Amino acid sequence: MDSWKTLAAIMMVSISADAMAWYVENPIERALTATTLFPTLVLGATTAFTVNGPSIMKKAKNDALTFIGSDGQIRGAQFEQASRYYRSNYNSPLMSDMQLAQAIATSF
């Protein structure tokens, strides 16, 4: 959740800085402000989103090992959350739950 707070803070700063930038009468200064501000906002947003995914997978490692050991019979809450995150954020072809559990167990 800290990444969401960071993203919100970056957006608030960028919006206020962006609003102030348009009051500058010099068009060159305005353009420089905008070209500096937008990449910073994009970088902050992508960082916030990429940090959240691996932390979910790391937390799900024990549940993934349990899932593998029980041959898919026991699904822990952390593994379920990681599975939902994976399915909502990645395009086809998707791994099966067993393949995802094995990937989590070996990668994190």
Image: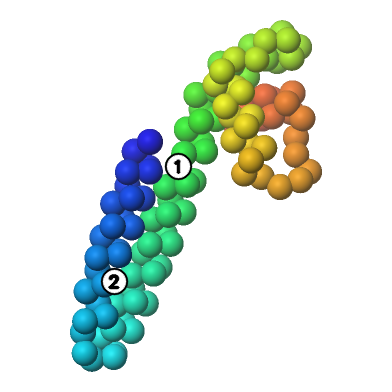
Q: CA distance from mark 2 to mark 1?
A: 26 Å
Image coordinates for residue 4, horizontal then vertical, percent: 38, 43
- Please give the name of the residue rendered at 32% of the width and 43% of the height, measured from the top-left corner: 5
Q: Which residue is mark 1?
A: 51
- Please give the name of the residue rendered at 47% of the width and 47% of the height, measured from the top-left corner: 49
Image coordinates for residue 81, horizontal then vertical, percent: 57, 27
Determine the secondary structure under disc 2. helix
Q: Which residue is mark 2?
A: 18
Residue 40 is marked as none
Indicate the amino acid at tag 1: Val
Q: Nearer the viewer, residue 12 or 41?
A: 12
Judged by depth in the image, the label closer to the viewer, 2 or 1, is 2
- Please give the name of the residue rendered at 74% of the width and 14% of the height, measured from the top-left corner: 72
- Please give the name of the residue rendered at 33% of the width and 70% of the height, measured from the top-left corner: 37
Image coordinates for residue 54, horizontal then vertical, percent: 51, 36
- Scheme by which the image is coloured: rainbow
Determine the secondary structure under disc 1. helix
